Image: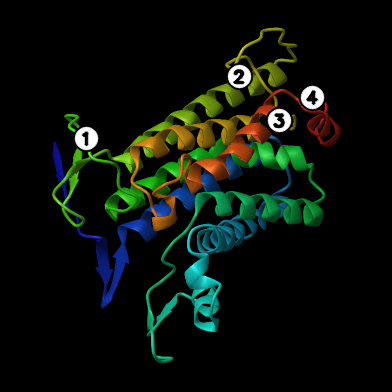
Amino acid sequence: MIHWNPDVVAFSLGSYGVRWYSLCWCIGLLSVYLLEQRLYKEQKIEDEKFEPLFLYCFLGILIGARLGHCIFYQPDIYLTSLKGVLSMVLPVHFAPNSWDWQYTGFEGLASHGGTLGLMLALWLFVRKTGLNLMRVLDNIAIVTPICACAIRMGNLMNSEIIGKQTDLPWAFVFERVDMVPRHPGQLYEAIAYALFFVVGWIIYRRGLRTTDNGQQSTSRGLLSPKHVGTGFFFGLCIFLIFSARILIEYTKEAQVAFEQDMIFNMGQLLSIPFVILGLYCMLGGKYCRMLGEKN
């Protein structure tokens, strides 16, 4: 059993405290940026086409994740008053009976909304740069799991999205919440996403080697060489991440009250379309072939 009660502030810059959650987000985004830059260089894509990518991804994920949380999980708070709508788009909290406000940062981000926001942002990026859509989606999907891992570690440092009670020896006691031993659902997800990154990276490197050597791979199976631009990596990423999400949700407490009596909670319901889309892309669906590139 692990007693867990870290300070939410990683370090301070003068009077401003940098929270672990924000730091994990920054580490995840920086990792994605550096790895993605490497992929674009290996694929001989011009630097000027890569440069705007980070801004598109950052805004797409942040805006999508914020709107996703507000719309999917707390519409009764954010969509029923002008203060709620303003709190949805501004990092502030308004007092109940006045327009007094306090800076809080954005409290509540949803991964499903972030994924949708990212997909929309990448579509806009493709329209601007003229790059192939499936190549862009595949490249970002290869590195995305490492960012998802970092974000879930931020949730762990915040002692949020806690798990159900358990007597397993690795149970966490989130002292900021209560003294009950619980599943560390955030850690389960972080470990899963780190493994998914390793799997995707290995498959990518094998595909890159066959391309460099002029080989035509006839091997089959998940770990056989695959090439960027087919939609396979995009499908693999969202299939693995959201399948894991569906399973790990069974270890978590309900995040909002209306989930208490649901057979499948909101996170699981929102994950199902992504799992189906992932399978479709992995199996080389018609539209993936139409939008993809011949390697």
Residue bearing mark 2? 206
Q: Is residue 16 left or right of residue 278?
A: left
Q: Work out which residue is located at the far top of the displayed protein and give it.
A: 218
Query: Secondary structure beneath disc 3?
Result: helix
Residue 295 numbered tag: 4
Front: mark 3 or 2: 3
Q: CA distance from mark 1 to mark 3?
A: 37 Å
**Kind of residue indicated by mark 2:** Arg
Front: mark 4 or 1: 1
Q: Is residue 120 left or right of residue 187?
A: right
Residue bearing mark 1? 166
> Picture quarter containing residue 91?
bottom left
The C terminus, quarter of image: top right
On screen, residue 229 above or below 7: above
**Kind of residue indicated by mark 4:** Asn
Q: CA distance from mark 4 to mark 2?
A: 14 Å
On screen, residue 84 above or below 219: below
Name the residue located 29 percent from the left edge and 56 percent from the top edge: 158
Q: Work out which residue is located at the far front of the displayed protein and give it.
A: 261
Residue 281 numbered tag: 3
